[in-house]
Amino acid sequence: MQITPPAAMRKGVILFLTEQREESSKETSLWLTDWVRTDPPMVLRIPLRRSASFTPDHQSGVEAPTPSPLKVEANVVVLGADSVGKSALTVRFLTRRFIGEYGDMESIYTHTLAAEGREILFHIWDFPCSQERTDESSSEDKRIQWADGFVLVYSICDRASFNSVQPKIQFIKAAKEGPAQEKVPIVIVGNKRDLHHRRTVSSEEGRLLALSLDCEFYEVSAAEAYHGALVVFNSLAERICEAKLAVKKGTGILSIVKSVSAVFARKRTDSM
C-alpha cells in the first residue's frame, strides 16, 4: 500500500512518503522515495523507521487506562434581593455571555463543569426575590432542603441588599445545620464591582460578614467578565464536594460503630 501526499519540490527531486505494509509481520515500514528526474527515472528508497502496526491486535506499548472523572451532582440555589444581578451572574456562568434584563422568572438550569479531576453536574435554581416574599414557608423549606449549596448575591451599590444577606444565611443554617451535620456550603457575592463610583458597601464589609458567618466571599462584575462567575461556582462546587465526602466518611464510621455495638450486644445477651 502506498500513501502519496502532495509532492515537495527540491532541486528537481520529488519527495514522496511511502507506506508499505508487510502482511506476514503485521508491521509497517515508512520509506522516503526519491524520484530523480532522469531518463529513465532513477528511484532511491531510503527506510526511515519501523512503526507499530495499526491493527488492533498489535500495540507498541501498554498504556495506562485514563481514570474516569469523579462525578458529583450539586444542587445550588441562588438568592438575593431584586436587581442585584442573580440571574445575570448565573447566565454568565452558564453561557459566558452577559444579559442585563430579566423578568421575575423562576428557572432551574443544568450545567456540567470539569474541574480538578471531577465532573460537576450543576442544577442551579434561580429564584426571584419578589416571588420569595409571597411564597409559602413550606415551599421555601423544600427549596432549602433540596439544595447542597447556596449563592447569596448583593449589589455593592445597594446597602439594603447587603443587609438582607445575613438573615437569609442565618435562616438557611438554622434549617440545614444540625448537631451531626456539616456546615452548609455558602458563597456570598458582591456584584456590580464595575460600578465602583456608586459603591455603598465596601469590600471589607463583605469580607467581615463572610468571615463571621463562615462563608466564602467574592466581589465580581457579571457585566464585565466571565471569570468572576466561574470562580464563584467553582468555589462552591469544591465546598459541596468536601461536605459530601465528610458525610460519607461520617456515615462509614457510624456504621462501623453500630456494627461493633451490635456484636457486643449479642455477646452480652448470649452470656446471660
Image (spheres, grey):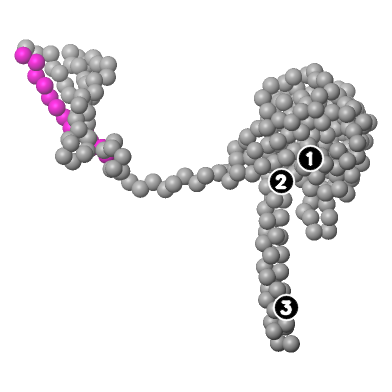
In the rendered image, which residue does mark 1 sit on?
Answer: 150
Q: Amino acid at mark 1?
A: Phe
Mark sitting earlier along the chain (3/2): 2
Q: Which residue is mark 2?
A: 240
Work out whether residue 191 can be spotted. Answer: no
* Amino acid, disc 2: Ile
Q: Which stretch appears magenta?
A: 40-52
Q: Does residue 98 sit above or below 231 in this rendering?
A: above
Label located before the other in sequence (1 or 2) = 1
Q: Residue at x 83, y 34 (%)?
A: 79
Q: Secondary structure at mark 2?
A: helix
Taking the spot 22% from the left edge, 21% from the top edge, the residue there is 16
Query: Could you say where residue 220 lies in the image, as x and y percent from the top left?
Result: 76, 30
Mark 1 and mark 2: Cα distance apart in space: 10 Å
- The answer to whether residue 136 is magenta is no
Q: Label 1 to label 3, Cα distance in Å? A: 43 Å
Task: In the rendered view, tell whether residue 12 sits above or below residue 227.
Answer: above
In this orientation, does residue 24 appear?
Answer: yes
Q: Which residue is mark 3?
A: 265
Q: Position of residue 247 (x, y in %)?
A: 71, 55
Q: Nearer the viewer, residue 165 or 11?
A: 165
Residue 139, quarter of the rendered image? top right
State left or right for residue 111 relative to residue 51.
Answer: right
Dot 3 falls on a residue whose secondary structure is: helix
Q: Amino acid at mark 3?
A: Ala
